[in-house]
Image (cartoon, helix red, strand yellow):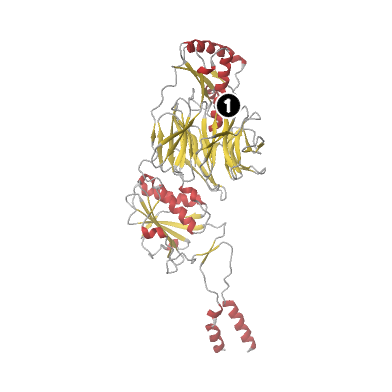
Amino acid sequence: MRKRLIMSLLLLALFTGCASKKANTIDINDGTSTGNGDEVVDSSQINGYQNVDPYGSENYGNVNYNQNSDYGAVGGGIKNIYFAVDQYVITPEKLPTVINNANILKSAIKTGARVKIEGHCDATGTDEYNYALGLRRAKAAKDAIVIRGVNPSAIKIVSMGESTPECTSSYSESCFAKNRRVEFKITR
Amino acid sequence: MRTILFVLFLTFNLFAVDAVFSIEKDVDAKTTLSLIEDISTSSSTPQHQKMFALLLNDLKMSGHFNVDEKLRRGDFGDGSMLPPELHDREYILKYSYDASGKKLDIKLIRTLDNTLFFQKGYSINVSTRYPFLAHNAIVDINHALGYDDISWMRRHILFSKYISSRKSEIWIADYTLSFASKIVRGGLSLFPKWANLEQSAFYYTSYNDYLPTLYRVDMQSGRSKKILSSEGMLVASDVSRDGSRILITMAPNGQPDIYEYGVNSGAKKRLTSFSGIDVNGKYLGDESRIAFVSNRTGKANIYTKYIGSSSVSKAAHYGYNNSSCDAFDQYILYSVKEGGAVNIYLGSANSSYVRPLTSNGINQLPRFSNDGKVILYIKKQGEKNSIGYMNLATNQNQLYPMQSGKIQSIDW
């Protein structure tokens, strides 16, 4: 009798539910149900569909530009100056080109022209740093021709980054080298 | 004896704890799930096939689901019989994508008892934006099942790409590039940057005026407003969380430095003054500090400084030629040139923590998602670009190829 009572108590303990709280447990009956205890219905369903189009109109944000063609003409005899990788110093062997360009530009400015110096990069760099590198090249070229008598107030500099490659035929270093340059444009 | 057992049997309910149905979320376990398309609206049109692929992709990309890749069709009604081979799946996602391509209904069925766990309907105004139906559905399902938020999936990406010499376009797209639309065209337009978390406006630099000019475009109206111009270069690098301040790279005297611009006041404060190159400013932490790229030690590298202080600290603890940085909280992403490759590394502005995220190829323009959990980057292979995503917690990784064009800049 006693044995049977002990067995029964053991069986009772076995059948008792032991719902313990575990980490990361989610109770789906947390008050979000609509009443039948099983279904979770989003309130937007009651009103129809949730519109997930944030901008509404057919053609949002459309901006059109006509390209400004006033990039300037390259004056006869003006030459580009080229740079080493990651560099913006005008090396001594480039000085004849600097002197040549300065003389041509001085004459052009006397007739009312202005000068735009564009700095360019190869495609190996990334976004902002590349544009800044192009700009420092343009500034180095400006400083070089100003020293040789070109009026600085007639000069504007701009970086074109990698947007305007001279060479697009391959992804070789010889092609990239042609793109690391400054160009001198005469504008009127 | 029989009497005792009978009494004990009657008392079971007195001692048993109420059975509450619980979903245990073991963080390492994935939910098994299969998809069933509504047979009454299913179609063999390309858009319907793409919807299945998108739902499948989003579920996988979340890192939280083990998804059956077979496309099945069946009854969309409640309580309908489930295919026997799917009884070992935890959930069935039924979806109904209508013929107009502008509406998606979903039902998440718990297979254990064939009951409806979650349901919702989604609509869009223009059918070409159908990917956002899928993205929103999976974000909501993920949330309903108690997983970490993946709202980054519903955001738009903004990128500029070169199309020819001196010409570029700005595009808006979903993260998979299944939807992509040109929004700025003509001339040279670069460096698009979202103006706020809501993505209701963006900044970009136009080279179509005499000087580089920063514009702000409102997405609803399409109206653009000139913000400022600068000789040399002009880039909106980062925007404060409340949208009131912009970190700008400007070069008024040919000297590229970082400035902070007050959107409402128009005031500019110069933050760097090194005589070389300082660019790519990004807010850190509470936005009293910035990370940026500088060549002050000869090669491009990543530095930090407090706004208002002249003291600068090196932030990248790996690599000697680093650029293209992004920041989230104290963490910094940057590209490292090493050998013939360019790889992306994750670092910290507050410690020497370093983690490589890519290991080969040319990987650039890393960007954090707005919650810092996922990164986006561009993988370049010759003329071709792909947009890659990496979930930093689950290591889920996926590449989406671009059809054409070379990406100049991207924002998320």
Residue B358 visible, this angle: no
Q: Is residue A102 above or below residue A65?
A: above
* Count of all numbered marks drawn on residues in the image: 1
Find numbered disc 1 in the image and state the secondary structure of the residue it sits on. loop
**Residue at image location 42% in from the left, 28% down from the top:** B187
Establish if B369 lies above or below A182.
below
Q: Residue furthest front?
A: B265
Rendered location of residue B385, percent (x, y): 48, 36
Percent position of residue B46, x then y: 36, 46
Pointer 1 chain: B
Left/right placement of residue A159 relative to residue B121 reads: right
Q: Nearer the viewer, residue B295 or B273?
A: B273
Quarter of the image for the N terminus of chain B: give it: bottom right
Specify the amino acid type for callout 1: Gln
To which residue does mark 1 refer? B255
Q: Camera-side residue: A90 or B397? A: A90
**Residue B269 in view (yes/no):** yes
Q: Position of residue B399 (x, y in %)?
A: 49, 42
Placement of B252 over or under A104, stated as above or below: below
Q: Is residue A160 above or below residue B343?
A: above
Q: Which image quarter: residue A150?
A: top right
The residue lying at 55 percent from left, 32 percent from top is B249
Q: Seen in the image, is A180 located left or right of residue B188?
A: right
Task: Estimate the x, y position of residue A56 in percent, counting from the top left.
Answer: 37, 46
B311 relative position to A162: left or right: right
Q: Quadrant of residue A96?
A: top right
